[in-house]
Image: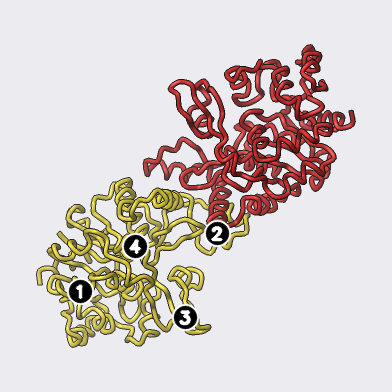
Chain colours: A red, B yellow
Amino acid sequence: MITVLAGGVGAGRTLAGLIQLIDQKDITVIVNTGDDEQIYGLYVCPDFDTLTYHLAGVANYDQGWGIQDEKWQVMQGLQRYRLDTWFNLGDKDLSTHIYRSFRLSQGAELSQIFKEITTAWGIQMQILPMTNDRFRTMIQIKEPKKEVPFQEYFVKLKQIPKISGIRFENKNSATPCPGVLEAITEADNIVICPSNPFVSIDPILNVKGIRQAIEKNRSKTIAISPIVAGTAIKGPAAKMMTELGYPSSVVGIASIYAPLAKTLIIDSKDANEAENVSHQGIDPLVGATIMKDPTTTRQLAQLILKAFKT
Amino acid sequence: MITVLAGGVGAGRTLAGLIQLIDQKDITVIVNTGDDEQIYGLYVCPDFDTLTYHLAGVANYDQGWGIQDEKWQVMQGLQRYRLDTWFNLGDKDLSTHIYRSFRLSQGAELSQIFKEITTAWGIQMQILPMTNDRFRTMIQIKEPKKEVPFQEYFVKLKQIPKISGIRFENKNSATPCPGVLEAITEADNIVICPSNPFVSIDPILNVKGIRQAIEKNRSKTIAISPIVAGTAIKGPAAKMMTELGYPSSVVGIASIYAPLAKTLIIDSKDANEAENVSHQGIDPLVGATIMKDPTTTRQLAQLILKAFKT
């Protein structure tokens, strides 16, 4: 039984590799919901949806979000009504958001809705939201000084402004989704996916009790570096590290994950940093981590299984 | 200045004719909102939308609802999630419902949203909801005895069950939309469209003060019979008349509209009923009323203008 801490694309690809080697039913995913946003009145869960579409084999792999072969009839209609359509949603994808919003309006919990959606796509692993409560990742921008929800920073502002910090709204009131703490405690191993440490993994860790639970289970936890040769495979992780005062390298990642994981998987391109990683107090494991297709995702999965055994 | 009481298709076609002869800006429409329904969590206004799409020239004319050349990607997605998709909504059409629901969630009034939607489609006449309040047409079914919202009777039950009555939910609390009573009082003429008298026109009349205002202005009001040669051009009007104890004929319509209108326009096919209409206390005006295309809608509009002058 393994438990996986997940953001979006990096986690989706990691899981697509793991299920080539492990029975889906033996995997529990705890997914970041700090990015969730009401878009045009619909409740969108970007990370959960990306995981779902990846596991269902319908993800728009290159774009990194949404479903492949989309049409945009609804968006075009919303533009007619002069909505600022800064957040693009394809027609197929929209059915997920309409369904989720409808079920929420009926009083269903997010975890129940996640189960319904994954079941509909034939996904057999359990994907739990980190919390059923509203929890919002807010990005603090340097110039002009202001705070915006993550999606506004990520999509509308295209991650261009420099940031000074990150705040988690409701972090003191949100409680872990039922099953989350048990999944951490009872797992044979825990995987921290190569997701953004600040805006994908840290929101999960900031839900009451989760960071402490992972720390207690450090000896069975492994992390995969989202940084390869100083840059992020996808998204603003490297830029954020610099702006938040970390070295943008696997060593920076090692300093963040050392209290949480016994092993950090780093890419072969960073083999020369292995010793510096080790100095941060976390064991490096070097291998091919860049995921492009079923073969490379499988290679990373093999590396993860190897890390479990060390 | 004319004011028009409107349901869906019959009204849409009547207005498409009138605007061939009258400046749109001289027309105010009061539209039935008793059919409005939350569908999959989205706020749908079937009659208003039908009018809008007719006036914008994008209506699916034969189907009688929705926009032409639709795709159904969102519906297919909702079916994957095992929603009972008894109410079909095309992808383009959905943008209207998403926009309206979003604006309602922001606290906008229905009348303001109607203005935004018609403006976006280049419609220059004013279309007012009969009320900004929730008002719901409930159909009382005979066997098995139960009450259902109009759309459930109309779409899901396909108008098959016999009905015993109609109830208007919130009729005592709903107030007319600002401008509605003024539009009735100040109009040079009032037109009651060939819509269903029970479920399109009567809901409007049952909003506080509207029936009395029309009765006071009977001398400038004309109605068009939705019944031709004993049957309805569209929908369950004839069947409902029989089930509610009226003769399914222009004479039945005459008995309903005599207190409200000085003139009833009836089709040439019912010319032999003119005297019986007259006996109900309303003046018949005979002509071609069946609207199929721009020529026939224009013919009815000419007949309406003639009725104004008699």
Decide: few, some or many residues near mark 4? Use Cα within 10 Å; few <14, some 14-19, many ≥20.
Answer: some
Using the rendered image of the protein, determine whether residue A66 is visible from the camera's viewpoint: no
First in residue order: circle 4 vs circle 3: 4
Type of amino acid under label 3: Ile
Type of amino acid under label 4: Asp
Determine contact: label 3, label 1, CB under 8 Å: no
Type of amino acid under label 1: Gln
Determine contact: label 4, label 3, CB under 8 Å: no
Dividing the picture into quarters, in which one does residue A17 lie? Answer: top right
First in residue order: circle 3 vs circle 1: 3
The residue beneath circle 2 is A106
The residue beneath circle 1 is B212
> Which residue lies at the image location 70% right of the left edge and 53% below the top edge?
A119
Q: Where residue A65 sits in the image (x, y, percent)?
A: 60, 36
Front residue (pair A300, B245): A300
In the figure, is residue B287 to the left or right of A9? left
Question: For the residue labelled by badge 4, is the local secondary structure a helix, a strand or a loop?
Answer: loop
The answer to whether residue A276 is above or below residue A222 is above
Front residue (pair B273, A36): A36
The answer to whether residue A198 is above or below residue B99 is above
Decide: few, some or many residues near mark 3? Use Cα within 10 Å; few <14, some 14-19, many ≥20.
Answer: some
Q: CA distance from mark 2 to mark 4?
A: 22 Å
Q: CA distance from mark 4 to mark 3?
A: 25 Å
Q: CA distance from mark 3 to mark 2?
A: 26 Å
